[in-house]
Each structure stands twice: as C-alpha cells, then as structure tokens.
C-alpha cells in the first residue's frame, strides 16, 4: 500500500476546503486527479485514500474512478498519446494514424511501451472535428496530424524532448497534467505563455468582426481582473447594496400581535394567519413536518388537515356492507359464485360409480349410446 506524501495530503485538504462542509464528497473528482498525479494512475491505495479523507467507502470511490476514462486503473506511461478514431477523424485518416503508432511502438490500446514513456489509446472523440484528424499528448492537441507526423512526435518524446502542440501550452508529463486537473496552477516558468489559437477557432471571431456582431454593451478592451480583485469588487458592491436598503417595515401580523394583549383570544397560542390561505401542498407539508412557523391546532381560525380518505356517507357504507354480505369471497376449491352443494353431490355420485341419472357408466357401449 502506498503512503502519500505530506504535500499530497495538504493539497487534499485544500481541495476539500473549496466545497461546503456538507458537500465535501463533491471534491472526489479533483482528489482522484490528485492521487493520479503522485502514482501515475488511481491505485487501490489511491481509492482508499480518497475514501478516507471524504468519509466514503471504497465502493463509492471505485464507482466514480471506473466511470471516467481520464482516471487510469493501471500504471500509465509518462505521456498518454490519444488518437481520435471517431467518425469524422476516421474519415480523414485517424485510424491510419493509430495503426501506424501501434505498429511502430509495438503496443495496442491502453498499453505502455517497455521504457514506460508512451501509453497509446484510441479515443472515441476529442471534440476537435474541425481540426481532424487529431491526436493529443496528455490532452494537448496536435491538429491535422498524419501518420509520419505522429511518429515524429512520439520519437521526440522518447528521446526526452517535448514537441510543441498545435494549440495550447507546452507539453508536460501526465503526472504534471493531473496536478492541473486537480485545480492547481502550472508552476513552470512561462508554461502558459506558449501556443495560440487555431485558425478554425479564429474564423468565427473574424466573421463577427466583419459583420459587426458583438455582445451588447461589452467593451472588448475591458481588462480581465484577478480573482482577488473580483472578490474585492463583489464585496464592495454587496456592502453598498446593504447600505442602500431601507429599514424593513414591521409585518402587519406582528404589529397586531404586539398591539393586542396575549389573552385577547383566550388561547395560549399566538395569533397567526390561518394556514387556509396557503396552497394545499404547503399545508400538508407543514402538517407532516411542523416547525415553529406552523400554526398550532388551537390557534384562532386554524384548520389542520389530516391525512386519510374523506368520510364516506352512511348510505354508501350500508350499500357496501350489503354487497359484501351477498357476495362472500370465493374459496380455493371453487370458482366465485358457485354453490358447494352441487359439487359435493357430483363427487359422491362419482365415488359410488353412478352417473347423475343413476345409470352405471359401464353400461355405455363404445358408440356412446345407452342400451
């Protein structure tokens, strides 16, 4: 069983603190990425660790870890190479790219090279049809890739290099990527300064500029604030809104309650609005689970609904009783409505060897005609 480092445990507590105390199990997804960042996959020890820090059982954690393909259940290479073989990329040559890599590396789907560098997998869709065929290395894109180009990428990776993706930041290892997926920034110098958008992505922006399409009231030169600045601005706006609120006027019911003596109604219960003005659903819910806001039974004008069927009129009750008496339930040995006397008589006659007319059944000939 693996023992996770203190840094991983500190990060786990930081992840859990992002969520409300009664919603801590929402931290499970980033926690699975976190344990994968240390071991390279979600091991049984990683499942146990997540269950321990979240107060879950291992079956609950394992169910999530086996549902999502980004969580690997066996040791994975330093670089995860995924080739899209879905319809669009397949038509454009994605399967040929995958086949060339599988033959060159000597591995199949979800298998790792002997040096532990490359794990190959085919992906159903990488959500980049306009760049197909596409390949990703640790989820960073290589667009419009061809078999030879894919081979060049993996050979550079095996040689210790880090080829630049077509879009996005510079490559990192699978463990480094898992740290980012757990919600922590890439701490490498200039790691997010590389790369740029692809041409198909810019096409929509250019069309919008060409035709004057924009979001109403939005200044594209508006600077993007940091999280601290955004939080400070939100706090200031909230404080101004609270200060601008007028003092709340007392509710009429409370004002009347304060004006009248407690003995005015002759009841120890406070004068409250009768619940009849509420919807039936609200009244029923309050009756089943009363709280301090629910009117008590002796409050003036209060009618507390009671669960159960409405009362049946007396004539209907009498009719139901008469019908029940006239139609006793059938026993197991006879159909409903049949009398038992006829069946008993037929049984006795059969045992005596005579038919219903007193004749001996043996007197009948083969033609079925009596002598």
Image: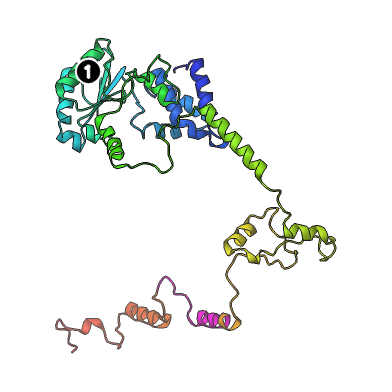
State the residue at coordinates (70%, 63%): 273
| Image location (x, y in percent) of residue 31 | 46, 27
* Residue linked to disc 1: 153
Residue 342 occupies which quadrant of the picture? bottom left
Residue at screen point 15% across, 23% down: 147
- Depth order, front residue of 337/84: 84
Residue 260: image location, x then y, percent:
83, 62
Q: Is residue 202 magenta?
A: no
Quadrant of image for the C terminus: bottom left
Determine if the magenta segment contains residue 326.
yes
Residue 263 placement (x, y as % from top left): 85, 63
Q: Considering only vertical position in the picture, is 363 above or below 263?
A: below
Per the rendered image, the range of residues in magenta is 317-333
Q: How is the image coloured?
A: rainbow
Residue 296: where, in percent of width, then height?
72, 60
Compared with residue 360, is residue 173 higher up or lower down, i.e. above or below? above
Question: Which of the pair 131/358 is nearer the observer?
Answer: 131
**Is 28 placed above or below 10 here?**
below
Which class describes the residues within 10 Å of circle 1: few (<14), some (14-19), or many (20+)? many
Element under disc 1: helix
Q: Dividing the picture into quarters, in which one does residue 318 lie?
A: bottom right
> Which is more toward the observer, 145 or 70?
145
169 relative to 51 in the view: left or right: left
Residue 191 to residue 310: above or below: above
| Quadrant in which the N terminus is drawn | top left
Left or right of residue 354, residue 283 in this image = right
């Amino acid at each position: 069983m693996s023992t996770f480092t203190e840094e991983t445990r500190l990060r786990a507590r930081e992840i859990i603190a992002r969520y409300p105390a009664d919603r801590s199990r929402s931290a499970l997804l980033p926690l699975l990425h976190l344990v994968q960042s240390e071991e390279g996959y979600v091991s049984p020890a990683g499942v146990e660790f997540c269950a321990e820090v979240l107060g879950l059982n291992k079956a609950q954690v394992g169910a999530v870890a086996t549902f999502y393909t980004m969580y690997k259940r066996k040791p994975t290479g330093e670089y995860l190479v995924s080739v899209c073989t879905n319809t669009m990329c397949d038509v454009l040559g994605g399967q040929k790219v995958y086949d060339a890599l599988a033959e060159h590396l000597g591995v199949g789907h979800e298998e790792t090279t002997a040096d532990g560098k490359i794990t190959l997998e085919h992906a159903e869709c990488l959500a980049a049809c306009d760049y197909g065929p596409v390949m990703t290395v640790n989820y960073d894109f290589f667009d419009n890739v061809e078999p030879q180009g894919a081979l060049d990428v993996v050979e550079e990776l095996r040689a210790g290099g880090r080829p630049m993706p077509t879009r996005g930041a510079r490559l990192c290892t699978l463990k480094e990527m898992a740290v980012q997926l757990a919600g922590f920034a890439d701490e490498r110098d200039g790691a997010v300064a590389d790369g740029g958008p692809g041409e198909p992505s810019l096409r929509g922006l250019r069309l919008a500029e060409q035709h004057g399409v924009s979001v109403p009231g939005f200044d594209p030169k508006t600077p993007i604030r940091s999280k601290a600045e955004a939080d400070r601005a939100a706090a200031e706006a909230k404080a101004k809104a609270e200060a601008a609120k007028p003092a709340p006027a007392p509710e009429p019911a409370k004002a009347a309650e304060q004006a009248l003596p407690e003995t005015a109604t002759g009841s120890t219960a406070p004068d409250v609005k009768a619940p009849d003005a509420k919807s039936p659903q609200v009244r029923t819910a309050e009756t089943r689970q009363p709280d301090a806001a629910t009117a008590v039974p002796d409050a003036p004008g209060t009618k507390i609904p009671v669960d159960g069927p409405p009362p049946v009129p007396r004539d209907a009750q009498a009719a139901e009783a008469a019908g029940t008496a006239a139609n006793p339930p059938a026993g197991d040995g006879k159909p409903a409505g049949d009398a038992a006397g006829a069946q008993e008589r037929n049984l006795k006659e059969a045992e005596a060897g005579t038919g219903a007319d007193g004749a001996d059944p043996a007197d009948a000939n083969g033609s079925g005609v009596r002598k």
